[in-house]
Amino acid sequence: MSITRIGLDTAKSVFQLHGIDEVGKVKIKRKLQRREMIPYFEKLEPCIIYLEACGAGHYWARILIGLGHDVKLIAPEAVRPFVKKGKKNDPADAAALCEAGGRPDIKFVPVKTEEQQAMLAVHSVRALLVKQQTMLSNAMRGLAAEFGLIVPKGIDKLVELMAQVDADENVPKQGRLAVQELFDQREFVAERIETLEAEIVAHARQNEAARRLATIPGVGPIAASLIAASVADFSVFKRGRDFAAWLGLVPRQHSTAGKTRLGKITKAGNREIRTLLVLGATSMTFRAPQWKSAAGVWADRLLQRKPFRLVTVALANKIARIAWALMTRNEVYQANGRVVTAAEAVA
């Protein structure tokens, strides 16, 4: 029998194959160098290939699909249970991929396009620069505090802090130099962030999916662009709760003997999307009394019974479910509870 399924463990230079036939008999265990990948799969009869959805997984998926193979991407956490205990190596990983892919209840990750991955790269760089900006701001405040100089919270207060450092004669020359270097670097990083955010906003305005997502209260252009670039196909989630669970916005369960115990949210899945949804929900929760819609009334009533942070996370969960509903039904958000199709909205 010929090879029907292959588990392919990818790396930078070495690739491990584990192929089986229709009855599950192992037909091939082989290691390939990077230069051998394309020539080998060009000659191989079309089959199903399983890859982990990480690293260069999407790149190799597009390459192998172009060679005529049926490629399936599997989330790493879905493959991990099939790795034999005590045998964590490349052949074992490839075999685990092959085993996991054959399970009837396995869920596959849609292959992203080059455009989606390019936009995700912009988001990743922006998130990194935002972290660096925060680090530089905190370092600047810390060094200035060593000389007794402080200012209120807020990035806009750093200019005032720099002015205090320059004006204080008790701060030695070396101290002023150190704080100035941090201030200049923070200004440079801020400029780069503005450039990236302009590119993200342009994508949010041009992309149809992002435009529909941006109609949801609490979803800005950055969140809309990130969701549109991250989720290639919303139909992989059967319901809105599954999408919220993928983002880690559902309670962690500790249930046994028929007793359900719910804890804090799982915080699984895409951290950046979850963070942006919670930030957007926080902004909307502050304005809940003036938010005259079904969701606003719901949030306002919940605030009377629950802590503020719990309400913001619950609202983020609701926003995620609304996003799934709009994207799967090709609709836009209507504040009065009525939804219309995207075509009607344009008209």
Image (spheres, rainbow, N blue to C red):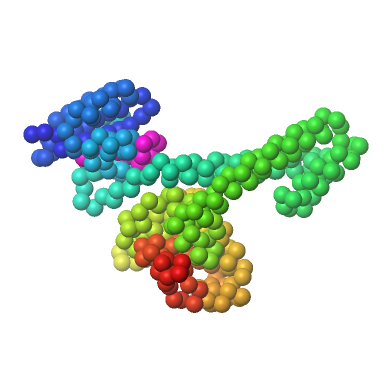
The answer to whether residue 83 shows anywhere in this view is: no
Q: Residue at x 70, y 43 (%)?
A: 137
> x, y (%) of residue 224?
49, 56
- Side of 67 relative to 150 (left or right): left
- The image shows residue 212, relative to residue 306, as above or below, that is above
Quarter occupied by the N terminus: top left
Q: Residue at x 51, y 61 (%)?
A: 214
- The image shows residue 329, relative to residue 194, as above or below, that is below
User: Looking at this view, is 5 or 299 the one in front?
Assistant: 5
- Side of 286 relative to 340 (left or right): right
Highlighted magenta segment, given as a residue range: 48-59
Q: Residue at x 82, y 29 (%)?
A: 174
Q: Residue at x 42, y 70 (%)?
A: 344
User: Looking at this view, is 49 or 64 the one in front?
Assistant: 64
Number of disc labels:
0
> x, y (%) of residue 295?
50, 73
Kindly indicate the quadrant of the structure image that contains residue 75: top left
> x, y (%) of residue 168?
89, 40
Residue 301 is a magenta residue: no
Quarter occupied by the C terminus: bottom left
Residue 57 is a magenta residue: yes
